[in-house]
Image: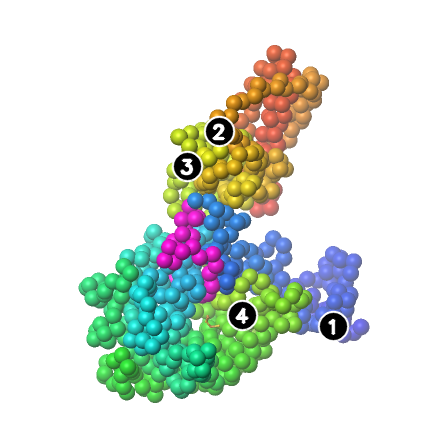
């Protein structure tokens, strides 16, 4: 009991609450919960460090690759709560990605040799940088399996572009950005002939197979990669691996590891020793050191040749012009990570227990002195490892990747075989701490930990195996991202997060304060091109155009109806539906789905989308909104009527009146009561400084939009009542009430927002 009391007291201090307040809120005491759930003091401390209370937000946002799903997973740190999946290389129905026409164009950019690829091995995300610091504008990610690169705009977290590498068949080292995001780097992995359509037998591996590094030119203003201004430096058929861009003093250079410099070709089925033996026979592989700035100049001088329409600097040119060097590095290296100050390069070899620290200054001195120990089989000068080695530190088994701390000289390296993270000092070579992780860590990430200005605080271990960590879900386990506190001298494990979407291979994390994503689009925007959508219309201008066998709808969406509510076509017609969301309120997204025709779009506030299909089967197909957007969301519906050719309408059956004057009078009473609510809400909003809150201004705009529709509907019910048509009078009065409800709903949301955000009284 005394132990519990002590632990309880400590926790209250940790949580910063008083005992009285703590006990007042819950019938079950903290001690009770600890006992019942068998929690230790350590557990409670970890919980307190990661728990983000309802309504509060995370300090950092992590972007993890979604592995084979081809997506990106976004989660908060330290809560480790997933906040978004971004569709990148594969369709993502919720976001309508791959269903509306503009997003199909983005996905089509990723066609390889005209083939549609429906998966992606999304691998290494990278955040755009300005002066080596994360700027929060763009995210890049590569697809290892099909050699593609994607651009995601962090203003709306949407994928804007996919480019397929015209000469590589697989790639691994990428995406890595140069310090001002002039280029996004991608390196080949398995060597292949660069001319896509040519066959060369494996016997010609040394002569005809090649690797390389592609530098994708990024146009920050347009937010797009410019393939025509991009280029590749051709490299020998060594399996190029991870890369990093220099920064600070090493800006203008990039570094790329390799394995299998043996250029071994396996063939176990022919009795040859397998790849794994032949590719790890030598004691060293090569670090490629490339002067990319000079390479870009060579391209500008016309010294590149075109392969598949893409600029390639041939090996001989790279050697002759002195932009390419090799340095031996210990056996089967993997990660290559430039230190935040840009002076050192840390290399971790999978089959070596050491990390090697190379000095950029020493590399430059050797190049200047033309001090090379040899040339490789392709004539590339080789700098001696001993000439550039600053330090070698024994860390443990299977070192892979290194990330940096905000504290000077502090690095963290993942140890795959040992299932550990090592904390060490790269200035004096001291190993400072080790922590076990569960299990078999690949990458690790610290906050902004590969930038020139790492932020410390947390480290996430991206473990390949979870084994026994989570409730079993069959033979295919989730992966385990473990959150580690690195703020003190000793690393402390805080949290295990299962990630069940592909192999979430690498992640990057940025201070959440650097991101300023939009809440709404300017009405009528095509989000994938960032331009006004040609299919957009304003409220009241909805219409349908028929041209031959093509029926094009220009419609709108607003709570709680889709305009139009019926779409009539003939079998065989091409149906094009443009939909604009007239919403401005935060988080008011509508969906649009049509049964049977594989249509599902997401239309966020202000967005316009176009969906297209051939109505090749006659029949009746409901369409509806797929987001639970309002109390009358289920009524946000309509019918696509696909009529047989030459169909003649049957004589309409007269509608039977069901409503009487009694119903109409009830409606009028309801309208008057609701108006009183609206008046009081409006009274409150206009009594405070609501104009200082842009989100409220948007809600008020939307509310006035809804209220603005009332007079026309009122005129209709007045007029019908005058005629004694209480059927239509009642229905139009009900519609007036619907507009009122939406006005009131928005008004109440605005009022709550203002109350919670400290609005101040203004004198009228
Ligand atoms: S590389 S697990 Cu595929 Cu990112 Cu090292
Ligand atoms: Cu709009 Cu449901």
Residue 435, image x and y in percent? 57, 78
Gap in angstroms between the C-alphas marked 1 and 4: 35 Å
Gap in angstroms between the C-alphas marked 1 and 2: 82 Å
The image quarter in which residue 610 lies: top left
Asked if residue 688 shows in the view, the reply is no
Magenta extent? 102-129
Q: Nearer the viewer, mark 1 or mark 2?
A: 2
Q: Tell me the residue at 42%/52% (across/down).
A: 107
Some atom of ligand 1 lies within 8 Å of the CB belonging to the residue at label 4: yes
Q: Earlier in the sequence, mark 2 or mark 4?
A: 4
Q: Is residue 113 magenta?
A: yes
The residue singled out by tag 1 in the image is: 6
Q: Tell me the residue at 39%/40% (across/down).
A: 532
Q: Earlier in the sequence, mark 4 or mark 3?
A: 4
Answer with left or right where residue 191 lies relative to residue 318: right
Q: Nearer the viewer, mark 4 or mark 3?
A: 3
Q: Is residue 449 magenta?
A: no
Residue 202, image x and y in percent? 35, 75
The residue singled out by tag 2 in the image is: 645
The residue singled out by tag 4 in the image is: 462
Gap in angstroms between the C-alphas marked 2 and 4: 59 Å
Badge 4 local density, few (<14 within 10 Å), some, or many (20+)? many
Q: Nearer the viewer, mark 3 or mark 1?
A: 3
| Image position of 91 with respect to 693: above or below | below
Badge 2 local density, few (<14 within 10 Å), some, or many (20+)? few
Q: Earlier in the sequence, mark 2 or mark 3?
A: 3
Say what secondary structure mark 4 lies in: strand
Gap in angstroms between the C-alphas marked 4 and 3: 44 Å
Say what secondary structure mark 2 lies in: loop
């Amino acid at each position: 009991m005394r132990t519990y009391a002590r632990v309880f007291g400590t926790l209250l201090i940790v949580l910063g609450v008083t005992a009285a307040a703590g006990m007042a809120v819950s019938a079950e005491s903290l001690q009770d919960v600890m006992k019942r759930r068998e929690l230790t003091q350590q557990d409670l401390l970890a919980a307190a460090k990661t728990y983000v209370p309802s309504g509060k937000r995370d300090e950092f946002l992590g972007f993890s690759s979604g592995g084979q799903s081809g997506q990106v997973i976004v989660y908060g740190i330290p809560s480790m709560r997933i906040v978004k999946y971004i569709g990148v290389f594969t369709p993502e129905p919720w976001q309508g990605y791959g269903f509306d026409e503009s997003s199909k164009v983005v996905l089509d950019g990723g066609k390889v040799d005209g083939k549609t690829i429906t998966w992606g091995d999304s691998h290494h995300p990278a955040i755009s940088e300005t002066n080596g610091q994360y700027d929060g504008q763009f995210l890049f990610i590569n697809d290892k399996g099909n050699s593609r690169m994607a651009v995601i705009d962090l203003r709306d977290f949407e994928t804007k572009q996919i480019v397929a590498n015209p000469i590589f068949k697989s790639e691994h080292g990428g995406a890595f950005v140069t310090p001002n995001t002039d280029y996004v780097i991608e390196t080949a992995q398995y060597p292949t002939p660069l001319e896509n359509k040519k066959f060369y037998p494996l016997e010609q591996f040394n002569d005809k197979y090649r690797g390389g590094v592609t530098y994708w030119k990024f146009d920050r203003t347009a937010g797009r990669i410019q393939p025509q201004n991009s280029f590749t430096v051709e490299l020998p058929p060594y399996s190029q691996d991870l890369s990093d861009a220099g920064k600070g003093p090493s800006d203008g250079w990039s570094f790329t590891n390799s394995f299998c410099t043996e250029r071994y070709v396996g063939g176990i089925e022919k009795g040859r020793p397998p790849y794994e033996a032949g590719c790890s026979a030598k004691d060293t592989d090569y670090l490629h050191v490339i002067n990319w700035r000079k390479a870009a100049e060579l391209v500008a001088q016309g010294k590149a040749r075109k392969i598949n329409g893409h600029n390639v600097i041939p090996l001989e040119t790279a050697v002759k012009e002195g932009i390419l060097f090799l340095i031996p590095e210990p056996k089967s290296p993997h990660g290559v990570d430039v230190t935040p100050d840009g002076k050192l390069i840390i290399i971790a070899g999978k089959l070596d227990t050491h990390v090697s620290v190379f000095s950029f200054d020493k590399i430059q001195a050797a190049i200047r002195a033309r001090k090379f120990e040899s040339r490789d089989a392709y004539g590339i000068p080789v700098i001696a490892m001993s000439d550039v080695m600053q330090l070698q530190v024994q860390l443990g088994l299977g070192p892979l990747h290194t990330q940096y701390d905000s504290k000077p000289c502090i690095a963290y390296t993942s140890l795959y075989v040992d299932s550990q993270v090592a904390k060490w000092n790269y200035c004096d070579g001291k190993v400072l701490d080790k922590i076990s992780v569960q299990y078999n860590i690949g990458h690790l990430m610290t906050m902004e930990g590969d930038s020139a200005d790492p932020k410390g605080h947390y480290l996430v271990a991206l473990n390949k195996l979870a084994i026994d960590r989570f409730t079993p879900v069959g033979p295919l386990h989730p992966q385990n991202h473990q959150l580690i506190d690195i703020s003190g001298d000793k690393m402390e494990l805080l949290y295990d997060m299962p990630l069940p979407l592909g192999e979430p291979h690498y992640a990057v994390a940025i201070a959440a304060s650097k991101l300023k994503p939009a809440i709404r689009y300017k009405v009528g925007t095509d989000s994938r091109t960032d331009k006004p959508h040609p299919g957009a219309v304003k409220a009241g201008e909805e219409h349908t155009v028929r041209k031959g066998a093509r029926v094009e709808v220009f419609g709108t969406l607003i709570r709680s109806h889709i305009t139009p509510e019926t779409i009539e076509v003939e079998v065989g017609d091409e149906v094009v539906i443009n939909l604009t969301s007239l919403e401005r309120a935060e988080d008011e997204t509508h969906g649009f789905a049509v049964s049977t025709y594989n249509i599902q779009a997401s239309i966020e506030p202000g967005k316009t989308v176009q969906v297209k299909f051939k109505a090749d089967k006659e029949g009746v197909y409901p369409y509806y909104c797929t987001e639970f957007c309002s109390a009358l969301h289920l009524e946000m519906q309509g019918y696509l009527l696909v009529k047989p050719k030459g169909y003649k309408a049957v004589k309409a059956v007269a509608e039977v009146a069901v409503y009487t004057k009694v119903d109409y009078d009830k409606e009028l009473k309801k309208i008057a009561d609701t108006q009183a609510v609206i008046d009081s809400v409006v009274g409150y909003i206009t009594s405070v400084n609501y104009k200082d809150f842009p989100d409220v201004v948007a809600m008020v705009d939307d509310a006035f939009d809804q209220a603005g529709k009332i007079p026309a509907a009122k005129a209709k019910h007045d007029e019908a009542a005058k005629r004694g048509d209480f059927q239509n009078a009642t229905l139009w009065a009900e519609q007036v009430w619907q507009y009122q409800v939406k006005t009131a709903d928005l008004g109440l949301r605005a009022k709550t927002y203002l109350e919670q955000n400290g609005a101040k009284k203004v004198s009228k």
